[in-house]
Image: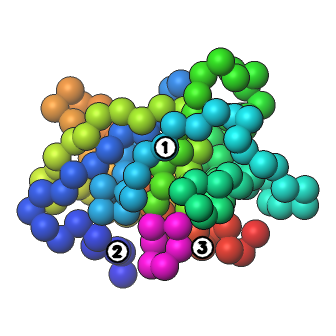
Amino acid sequence: MPKQPFLNSSTQFISIEVTKTLEVILSTRELDEVITLDHRKILQIPGMPTVVAGVFQWQGEILWLVDISYLMGFEPLLSTGDYEQKFRVVKVKFRDTYLGILVRKVGNLINIESEEISSGKTQKVNSVVGKFIQGTWTNSAGEKKMILDIEAIIEYIEKT
């Protein structure tokens, strides 16, 4: 049975730029905070799965960083050479686990009515991206936005 995480009549989402051409949205219920991060603060750990960009210290804790671009089958953010730009880390909480998701950019907050959300996987994305999507929403301009599935990301990393 598909997940039904959006039970209230309206849920707030934040848009996240994965690549220059791919933007997804994330429920703010899963969002803990957004952090601006200089790439030099990331400590890469040898032997870790390639989707793990590394770790960094944030307010007295060590936060694991997942490169969402690489996870979804695109070029790793840290290999773009765009080091003038500071990266954004979307710190999420799922159950008792905190995870930092390294993204290009964080965009706007969007209020979405639950009946506007199509649950389930979308057929128009590649299978790598589709594994981490739990539904879609189409805005008034007709643009379809995919909803990021944090649980699927954490489960994937735990298996890797």
Residue 40 painted magenta: no
Under circle 3, the secondary element is helix
Report the front residue among 17 and 96. Answer: 96
Kindly identify the residue that appears in the image at 54 percent across and 57 percent down.
59
Task: Give left or right: position of 81 versus 103.
Answer: right
Q: Residue 153 carries which label?
A: none
Please state which amino acid type lies under the numbered disc 1: Ile
The residue at which mark 2 appears reads as 3
Task: Report the quarter where the C terminus lies.
Answer: bottom right
Task: Report the quarter where the N terminus lies.
Answer: bottom left
Q: How far apart are marks 3 and 2 (CA)?
A: 15 Å
- Residue 151 at x, y percent in the picture: 49, 70
Report the front residue among 159 and 45. Answer: 45
Under circle 1, the secondary element is strand
Kindly identify the residue that appears in the image at 16 percent across and 32 percent down.
140
The residue at which mark 3 appears reads as 155
| Mark 2 surroundings: few (<14), some (14-19) or many (≥20) residues within 10 A | few
Which residues lie in the magenta part?
Answer: 93-98
The residue at which mark 1 appears reads as 35
Please state which amino acid type lies under the numbered disc 3: Glu
